[in-house]
């Protein structure tokens, strides 16, 4: 990490010292100013001093932000009560496995019928290495992690919109990557060697560039041409005895360009979409399970908040038990409200009008996922693809439709793959279909890539749409630039004695780290205020 001209002062050390002085809020602001806010701004909860004994805190919602707030505040001596509308903790960090029951608004309840031991993460899907807050709790609660293969060069890309002979064919990702980079390197190398880059760089830089292009594009040193490489794959794999193997032949440059398949790749992945990520062994909900033994004595499940009121002495939430019909209320000195803004702004509260208006400035993403159980892992057995994504240009409301292959249970008999991850208009459209109709739509696309194998191996499926979840009404918060500048700062500050928390109060919306770190930020503010009083 760079030195800033002060002996021993690096950006990392600066942030650490800033955190000691200004707390989590100051660190978040600094990270945003540095342009690195998509990484975790903090690696562990704030070091808070003083006692919260004798003070009560009401936490609304037992997702990651709520559970974190309750857990950390209780360690300081606060008397905490958590009200959660669902029958389980974890919020959107859910895993569908055998017996899991979910009911979307306007739909019948659906029960997951996967075989024992198989599952699909219907909420968060992966953990980047730089989301230190998420990794902190996984380690803290001894939740074992395994590698999640997010990119796999052996996997396929498929285009039905492209042109030329490669359209409508499944192609190994390594083939397209090697060919497009090889031919592009050849063009630049030949231009440099024939003087067409004169005036654009120094002669010594040109020589270094040529060496780089030869290396990057697997070019022939003799004529600076790309003739293919065995790194793109083999036509006949080398073996024992006289089987020396036969290299695959590159596609023509024109065919690669016409196919449009190059659009699926960048030189490096997006910062929050690393090639290799982590996932908890057994499902993403294992992190939420890690909190449960520590917060169960303060937790009221199936408790839907109907009204929130506050005065200069405390906060009261009126609630109803959705199983028994019992009604009651809970009062505390302060409140951490981790209810998604998509739900909260419609509730009966006494927030000031400008606070409610700020909540209304954020939209929530329509998002759906589908898990498909296959009786045979044909992607592994027939094609040697272990994890990663099948990428296609079918419309999913996002740049690409992916079929994600499981990164667990290697070489076992059965497996559950992510058959669809749909967004926006496509999510809205398909969410209106029945469970059977949705699955049939997703099988149709999978059958295009794996004809004769996808449908014939399918056994059972499960779909879930977050914008139809009663207590979420969206996958994650989507802030516009203007709303970030005007409404967002208002919500970072408490309204009276109520502090909001959740992924929506972060620059990592849709990620678990956003929920954890927003909770850290708000409990620090609450504790400083409570102990100062």
Image (cartoon, rainbow, N blue to C red):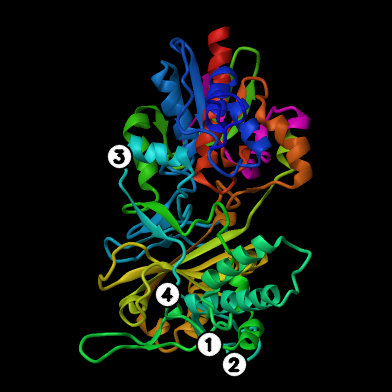
Please tell me which residue is depicted at 67% across the width and 24% down the height of the picture: 495
The secondary structure type at the circle numbered 4 is: loop
CA–CA distance between discs 1 and 3?
A: 44 Å
Callout 1: helix, strand or loop? Answer: loop
Query: In the rendered image, is residue 228 in sight?
Result: yes
Q: Nearer the viewer, mark 2 or mark 3?
A: 2
> Would you name the residue on which mark 1 appears?
169
Q: Was residue 180 drawn as part of the magenta stretch in this picture? A: no
Q: Label 3's element?
A: loop
The vertical placement of 39 against 375, above or below, is: above
The segment highlighted magenta reads 326-355
Identified at 73% across, 61% down, the residue is: 201
Circle on res. 142: 3
**Inter-mark Cα distance, 4 to 3:** 33 Å
- Please name the residue that numbered disc 2 is placed on: 165
As measured in the structure, the alpha-carbon distance from the residue carrying label 4 to the one carrying label 2 is 20 Å
Residue 513: horizontal and vertical position, in percent?
51, 41
- Above or below: residue 466 compared with residue 43: below
Residue 426, by quadrant, is bottom right
The disc, 4 or 2, on the residue closer to the chain's N-terminal end is 4
Judged left or right of residue 114, residue 475 is: right
- Where, quadrant-wise, is the C terminus in this rendering? top right
Q: Label 2: state its secondary structure.
A: loop
Q: Which mark is residue 154?
A: 4
């Amino acid at each position: 990490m760079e030195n800033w001209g002060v002996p021993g002062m690096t950006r990392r050390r600066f942030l650490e010292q800033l955190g000691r002085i200004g707390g989590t809020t100051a660190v978040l602001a600094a990270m945003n100013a540095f342009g690195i806010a998509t990484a975790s701004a903090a690696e562990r909860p704030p070091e808070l001093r003083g006692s919260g004994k004798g003070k009560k805190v009401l936490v609304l919602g037992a997702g990651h932000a709520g559970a974190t707030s309750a857990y950390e505040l209780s360690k300081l001596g606060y008397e905490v009560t958590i009200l959660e509308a669902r029958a389980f903790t974890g919020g959107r960090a859910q895993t569908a496995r055998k017996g899991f029951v979910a009911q979307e608004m306007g739909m019948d309840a659906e029960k997951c019928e996967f075989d024992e031991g198989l599952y699909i993460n219907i909420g968060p899907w992966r953990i980047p290495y730089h989301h230190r807050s998420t990794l902190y709790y996984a380690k803290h609660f001894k939740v074992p992690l395994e590698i999640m293969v997010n990119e796999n060069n052996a996997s396929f890309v498929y285009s039905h919109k492209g042109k030329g002979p490669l359209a409508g064919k499944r192609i190994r990702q390594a083939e397209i990557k090697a060919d497009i980079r090889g031919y592009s390197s050849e063009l630049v190398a030949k231009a440099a060697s024939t003087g067409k880059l004169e005036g654009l760089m120094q002669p010594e830089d040109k020589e270094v560039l040529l060496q780089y292009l030869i290396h990057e594009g697997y070019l022939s040193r003799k004529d600076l041409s790309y003739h293919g490489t065995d790194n793109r794959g083999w036509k006949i794999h080398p073996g024992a005895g006289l089987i020396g193997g036969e290299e695959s032949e590159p596609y023509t440059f024109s065919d690669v360009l016409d196919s449009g398949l190059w659009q699926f790749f960048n030189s490096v992945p997006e910062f929050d979409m690393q090639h290799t990520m982590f996932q908890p062994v057994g499902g993403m909900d294992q992190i939420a399970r890690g909190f449960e033994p520590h917060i169960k004595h303060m937790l009221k499940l199936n408790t839907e908040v109907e009204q929130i009121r506050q005065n200069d002495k405390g906060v009261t939430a009126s609630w109803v038990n959705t199983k028994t019909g019992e009604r009651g209320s809970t009062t505390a000195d302060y409140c951490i409200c981790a209810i998604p803004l998509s739900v909260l702004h419609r509730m009966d509260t006494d927030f000031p009008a400008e606070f409610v208006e700020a909540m209304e400035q954020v939209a929530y993403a329509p998002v759906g996922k589908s898990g498909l159980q296959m009786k045979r892992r044909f992607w592994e057995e027939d094609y040697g693809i272990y994890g990663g994504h099948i990428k296609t240009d079918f419309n999913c409301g996002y740049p690409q439709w992916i079929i994600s292959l499981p990164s667990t249970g290697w070489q076992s008999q059965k497996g559950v793959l992510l058959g669809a991850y749909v967004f926006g208009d496509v999510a809205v459209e398909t969410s209106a279909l029945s469970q059977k109709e949705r699955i049939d739509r997703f099988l149709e696309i999978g059958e295009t890539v794996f004809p004769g194998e996808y449908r014939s191996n399918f056994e059972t499926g499960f779909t879930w749409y977050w914008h139809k979840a009663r207590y979420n009404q969206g996958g994650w918060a989507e802030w516009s630039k203007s709303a970030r500048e005007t409404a967002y700062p208002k919500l970072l500050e408490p309204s009276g004695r109520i502090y909001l928390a959740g992924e929506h109060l972060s620059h990592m919306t849709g990620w678990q780290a956003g929920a954890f770190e927003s909770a850290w930020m708000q409990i620090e503010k609450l504790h400083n205020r409570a102990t100062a009083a």
